[in-house]
Image (spheres, helix red, strand yellow):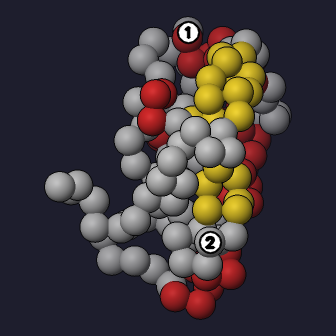
Amino acid sequence: MSAHILPDSRAGNETFGSQMVDWPLPDGTAMRLEAVAVYCANCGKHSAWAPGTGSGQNFLFYLCAKCYEKHGDIVGTFALPDDEFCQNVAAEMLDKHGKHLSEVEIATLDDAGRLAKELKLLERESPYLTQTPR
């Protein structure tokens, strides 16, 4: 029995509709992996692609903006629209580093331990990054 009470937003059969993609990494390189379609858990609208379970990601819940606006927050979860997340990252880059950083600059600062603490925290919440061990 799953510990998750919310439904997984990926198709039940990940091989149906999956695609092999070059997934961009923060250091500017890419990793080839199988990406699976992500659907709104409420209305079923296809919204994005995410790494499959072979990447170590074992759960994904997603609500499209329209359904989120209609149903609101889900108790015990954290929600932030993608565009608001991107605005937060851009604001922190300007505030802490004085400019918008490229992916290579972010990776270089992170490897050197000089990436602003706030950006490091936002990295954990990124809807775009696959968390891989370093």
Q: What residue is rendered at 33% in x and 77% in y?
A: 75
**Pointer 2: residues within 10 angstroms few (<14), some, or many (20+)?**
some
In this orientation, does residue 48 appear? yes
Q: Where residue 68 sits: x, y (%)?
A: 58, 79
The C terminus lies in which quarter of the figure?
top left
Image height of 78 relative to 117, above or below: below
Residue 14, by quadrant, is top right
Q: In the image, 33: left or right of 41?
A: right
| Nearer the camera: disc 1 or disc 2 | 2
Residue 117 appears in view? no
Callout 2, which amino acid? Answer: Gly
Work out whether residue 112 or residue 125 is closer to the camera in this orientation and state it: 125
**Are there few (<14), some (14-19), or many (20+) residues within 10 Å of tag 1?**
few
State the quadrant of the N terminus: bottom left
Q: Which mark is residue 53?
A: none
Disc on the earlier residue, 1 or 2:
2
Residue occupying image coordinates x 28% and y 59%: 4
Image location of residue 7, percent across then percent down: 40, 65
Distance between mark 1 and mark 2 Cα atoms: 42 Å
At mark 2, the secondary structure is loop
Q: Amino acid at mark 1?
A: Ala
Q: Check disc 2 and report the residue beneath it.
A: 44
Instruction: State the residue position of label 1.
Output: 112
Q: Residue furthest left?
A: 1
Q: Disc 1 vs disc 2: Cβ atoms closer than 8 Å?
A: no
Q: Residue furthest bottom?
A: 70
Q: Residue at x 70, y 27 (%)?
A: 20
Please name the residue shown 42% across and 17% down the image.
Answer: 133
Q: Is residue 30 left or right of residue 121?
A: right
